[in-house]
Image (cartoon, helix red, strand yellow):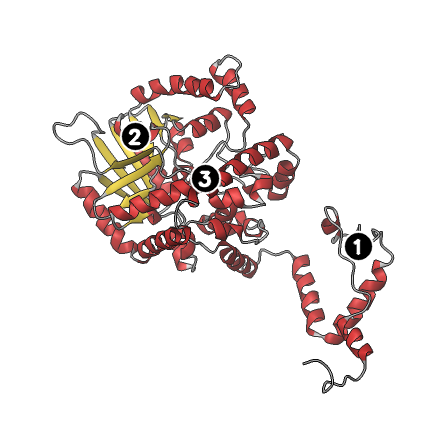
Amino acid sequence: MTVDPSAKYHRRVKQALADDRLHTALERATSRLRDKRAAAVEAIDLEQVRDQGRAIREHAIRRLPELLEQLERNLIANGCRVHWAESAVAARDIITAIARQHGVRRAVKSKSMTTEEIHLNHALEQAGVKVVESDLGEYIIQLAGESPSHITAPVLHKRAEDISELFQRELGMQPTADPAEMCATARGQLRSEFLAAELGISGCNFAIAETGTICIVTNEGNGRMVTSMPPVYVAVMGIDKVVPRVEDALLLWQVVARSATGQEVTVYFSATSGPRGTGHVDGPKEMHVVLLDNGRTRILERGYADALLCVRCGACLNSCPVYREVGGHAYGETAYSGPIGAVITPLLADNPFSAKELPFASSLCGVCREVCPVKIDLPRLLLDLRHDMIQLGTSTRYERAAMRAYTRTMESPRTYGRASRVARWLMRLLPQDRDGNVLKLPPPFSNWTRTRAFPRLAQRSFRELWRSRGPQDTASGDA
């Protein structure tokens, strides 16, 4: 069984919960990533690094207009062409026009959640451009006709056995479970794509304003080939990715690596400031940078600036008990899943009702806040977003009626007392375990007892117990 991202939310969740193969893959991957992160952060003063990382991101977001203008000036001075895209549609149109201008028929991409966000591949393919993902995880997902299920590990939801079957079917690989052989098969297929591509496309981990430099971090080296081998290179950058100085990018690089993959640093840090210079043999002849808003300004305006501090490490996904049960596809057709996705997906959407369930896909346990390398208070953001969603009218008529009844009951001691007595009497009529916990409640409360027992109600209320004590001699009692 697989999870269909286009299905209704509750159907997606049920599909995920019923998929034993998915649970196996999620447990293997998230456990390994959590363990590697824990080992990596032991070697540093974690709180100091988190404070430094947050300070850098806060500083950049506060000075966002100024830093973006500085970045644009320096990129242009370096020979780049800069494009501003207010929306996903605008960004797709800009990149499609660049491809048409140069007669592009083949493009290679480095891993980029921003391009997933704007559905760039589909737009280019409609324009007659064959797009090949060069990151191994993204390549696997592309072969399978799926979307990524994780911010940093797009193929996390698949087992090695599933990938082997896919390569045998799509690439003609001989049956094997050896990861090295599977990687060699993919490498052999991708090498020719780098050589034939007329257009290279990447995202952006950090954009350094003082030098006009686009930085991407990878572990496979494909990012460097995407940005240097094709004659035309396009970087798609969310406007929140700008940082003031080189030193800021280098510190955040370490922050991302330790939290995402448990490394001190990633294997590759590729920095590109402009097209090939005179006399140079490497690099693109032409470099474009697309500065993408697509709702990020709206996030600032609505008071959710903390969400833009995210460095896309995926640590919150690996620790979240909800994500570890249902995986990324249960969050729908979105580039961002897990706790951070539950916040930014509704905020980025033109129609927040399209993702109205996501802020409620959290237990609010707080572990996402504890592992975030830049100290984003995700539980608070989720609670704020839940409030805003209710204010927009996303709750059903039955939910509103239930909350009104609950409010009236809790505001009146007499009504509360009567309701408690009725509830205790009704509980005696329902099936119970030997400790008095109710095993089955009638609808709509049956959703609770479908997976757990309802705790036994106290036989006497606090007020009844207090009255039964009678007058107390406070002078002779304990203080």
Q: Are marks 2 and 3 in contact (CB under 8 Å)?
A: no
* Camera-side mark, 2 or 1: 1
Quarter of the figure that contains the N terminus: top right
User: What's the amino acid at mark 1?
Assistant: Asn
Q: Is residue 96 visible?
A: no
What's the residue at 42%, 60% (across, down)?
A: 303
Nearest the viewer among 106 and 194 is 194
- Disc 2 designates what residue? 224
Residue at position x 24%, y 34% from top?
287
Q: Residues within 10 Å of mark 2 (few under 14, many from 20)?
A: many
Q: Earlier in the sequence, mark 2 or mark 3?
A: 3
Residue denoted by label 3: 151
Three-letter amino acid code of the residue under disc 3: Ile
Q: Nearer the viewer, residue 459 or 112?
A: 459
In whole angstroms, how far apart are the C-alphas of marks 2 and 1? 60 Å
Along the polypeptide, which appears first: circle 2 or circle 1?
Answer: 2
Please state, as top left, top right, bottom left or bottom right, where the C terminus lies in the image: bottom right
Q: Residue at x 34, y 19 (%)?
A: 191
- Badge 3, how many Cα within 10 Å: few under 14, some, many 20+? many
Front-lying residue, 395 or 60: 60
Q: Residue furthest left?
A: 279
Tell me the element at label 2: helix
Please give left or right for residue 334 compared with residue 248 in the image: right
Check contact, mark 2 vs mark 1: CB within 8 A: no
Q: Would residue 242 be found to the left or right of residue 21 on screen?
A: left
Residue 312 drawn at (x, y percent):
42, 44
**SS type, badge 3:** loop
Question: Disc 3 versus disc 1: distance between alpha carbons?
Answer: 41 Å
Q: Residue at x 42, y 55 (%)?
A: 306
Name which residue type carries label 2: Arg
Q: Earlier in the sequence, mark 3 or mark 1?
A: 3
